[in-house]
Amino acid sequence: MNIKFWGTRGSIASPGPETVVFGGNTTCVQITTDSGLVAVIDAGTGIRNLGDFLLHRSEQKMIHFFVTHVHWDHLIGLPFFAPLFRPDYHVVFNGCRKCFEGVKRIFCSDAIDGTWPVRFQDLKAQIDPPAEAPMGSFSLGDVLVESHGLQHPQGGLGFKFTEGKKKFAFLTDNELTEEGWKGTCFKDFVNFCQGTDVLVHDCQYSPEEMISRKGWGHSDTTIVARLAVETGAKKLILFHHDPWRNDDGVREIITKCRESLDRLNSNIFVDAAREGITIAL
Ligand SMILES: [Zn+2]
Ligand SMILES: [Zn+2]
């Protein structure tokens, strides 16, 4: 399984010379399984480049979508995803039906005098809504995909992909807390992410910033380091970079997380997600 980051930023795109190392596009991650299936997590602004890549440099015409939640930074790129405008593409949405309603509304022109000129029903690709089955686990060829609720305003889903002995967990827009949030607690996430080779987790803030941002639905370096250690993750990748943070600022977040891992006597590899980089499992 390969994981490629097309968008790493949180909240709003932040392009420019100060963010070229870690990227300015919002959430979009491509997963390519060993058998060549293509899955996409979220449709932030990074998805425009992924669409062009799939159109011009890939034979794959079937795309499996996993949407974490419907906040704008995770869907706003969808109208620019070129395969949706092509009749030879088949796009399958997995996950909760509420997310699919959000997907359709990105194209909706009912609000005001219209927010986008193309209607969802006018897209040319074959588009399948999520199955009626309640959210839980799916099979994507040989890959088992499991989901877990997020601690985030208005909710959301994190995903874990297991292919053979390899495990990849992706949780963004998730505020890990000691006290828990609406029925889920830190231990639930430890169980869900147990034994992952690559753990990608929201780490938008430093512990100092977190003091004034509780309840916003994002995590800080200290608790993310703890999650990585308690799950036995081999690689920790920090995600959903704050839009006000330049490349040097993201490097400081990596350093703070490294220091937290050191205090826990852990030598887990840690880095921040970098737009355009592929991680092979
Ligand atoms: Zn977000
Ligand atoms: Zn969000």
Image: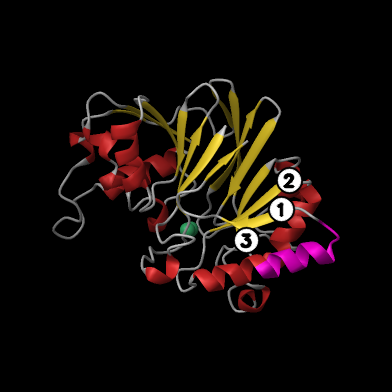
- Quadrant holding the N terminus: top right
- What amino acid is labelled 3 in the image? Glu
- Quadrant holding the C terminus: top right
Q: Tell me if 97 is positioned left or right of 240 in this view.
A: left
Q: Name the residue nearer the viewer: 243 or 35.
A: 35
Q: What number is the disc on residue 175? A: 3
Could you tell me if the residues under marks 2 and 1 are in contact, i.e. CB atoms within 8 Å? yes
Q: Quick one: label 3 or label 1, which is nearer the N terminus?
A: 3
Please say if 204 is above or below 238.
below
Local SS, label 3: loop
Residue 226 position within the rendered picture, expressed as x and y whole percent measured from the top left? 77, 59
Whole-Å distance between the Cαs marked 3 and 2? 21 Å
Assign the magenta stretch its main secondary structure: helix
Residue 67 position within the rendered picture, expressed as x and y whole percent measured from the top left? 46, 43
Q: Tell me if 212 is positioned left or right of 256 in this view.
A: left
Give the class, few, some or many, for how many residues have Cα within 10 Å of label 1's Cα (few <14, many ≥20): some
Residue, disc 1: 269
